[in-house]
Every structure is written in C-alpha cells, then in structure tokens.
Image (cartoon, grey):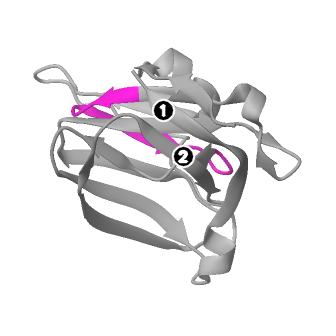
Amino acid sequence: MTRTLRLEPLTAEAFAPFGEVMDAPALGERPMLGASLRALPGAPTPTLAFSHIAPHALPIVATRMERHNSSSQCFVPMDVSRYVVMVAPDKGGAPDMAGLRGFVARGDQAVNYAIDAWHHPMHALDRPARFAVLMWSTGEKARDEEWATLPEPVTLSE
C-alpha cells in the first residue's frame, strides 16, 4: 500500500520543527542563519559542496529518508525553479510517519535541516537545479549520514 502526501508551500513556521528556512532577502538586507548552522563535537570539518541534479515530475514516490547525526545540512539554491522537501521527526531511531510533512520550496528559499532531522533526498521540479550544500563532517560516512527505509512508500503530489 502507498500513502499519499500532499505537498504544501514551504514556510518558515511549518518547517521550524525540522530546521530553518531562509527566504531571499529584500534589497539591502543581509539576514543570517545562526544557531541552526551547527555541528556536534567530533565533526570538525566544514564542507561546501555543489550539486547539479536532474528534474523530476510529480508525483514522486519516496521509499527512504536520511539524516545527519553530527551536522546540520544547508541547501542554498544557486539556479533552481522549485524543489521538494519531505521531512519527518525521529521516533526511536526511524522517521515518525505520523509527523511526515511535504513541501514545495521556491527557487529563492534555502533550507537548513537540523541535526537528526529525517529528510528525503533532494528532488528538483521543472528543470535541472544547482545547489550549494554546507555541512560538517566527521570524516566517516557511516557517522555522517544514516538511512532508513520507510515502512510504506509515500507518493508526493501537489
């Protein structure tokens, strides 16, 4: 059986339990992400990566989620139309399906996933997308990221 999750527009308030949203600043403004950009002791190395991902059409079927145990993970759009953000709180070391949320982000919104926030891998909509991705690393992939298979597939749709 497949569960359907309707995507909603991304807002800072709705996303707050999972991290922080940064909307494009107004002309002359310079807002900053602060306390949400962080790493735990043992993840001393900041990494700034650049990704270029192919677009997907809705609906998208999600079967797995990931989280980062030692670092927040910030996606900053560089050339993006829209993208999908699916998140869930933790429940006993796995995504809590009861708290699953899905959003459509605009190309001028950055997201910073909090440490331990379960999230679906990045999926761009409409056209290929480029992101800058900031996080910290322990130097051991197994300690930096954890994957979970969902108990049932989730279809993301508008």
Residue 145: image location, x then y, percent? 62, 67
Amino acid carrying label 2: it is Ala
Q: Are marks 1 and 2 in contact (CB under 8 Å)?
A: yes
* Secondary structure category for the residue under label 1: strand
* Residue 111 visible in the current orientation: yes
Q: Nearer the viewer, residue 20 or 89?
A: 89
Residue that label 2 marks: 62
The total of numbered circles placed on residues is: 2
Which image quarter holds the N terminus? Answer: top right
Report crowding for label 2: few under 14, some 14 to 19, many 20 or more residues within 10 A (C-alpha): some
Residue 83: image location, x then y, percent? 32, 38
* Secondary structure category for the residue under label 2: strand
Amino acid carrying label 1: it is Leu
**Mark 1 or 2, nearer chain start:** 2
Residue 46: image location, x then y, percent? 45, 69
- The vertical placement of 70 against 122, above or below, is below
- The vertical placement of 65 against 152, above or below, is below
Q: Quadrant of residue 134?
A: bottom left
Write the start and end of the magenta stretch as one range: 104-117
- The vertical placement of 68 against 78, above or below, is below
Instruction: Judge from the rendering whether residue 146 lies leftward or rightward of residue 56; answer left or right.
Output: right
Instruction: Judge from the rendering whether residue 47 lies leftward or rightward of residue 76; answer left or right.
Output: right
Q: Nearer the viewer, residue 119 or 6?
A: 6
Q: Whole-Å distance between the Cαs marked 1 and 2?
A: 7 Å
Residue that label 1 marks: 156
In percent of the image, x 51 and y 28: which residue is there? Answer: 102
Residue 116: in magenta span: yes
Q: Determine the residue located farthest toward the left in the rendered image.
A: 27
Q: Nearer the viewer, residue 41 or 59?
A: 59
In percent of the image, x 59 and y 59: which residue is there? Answer: 71
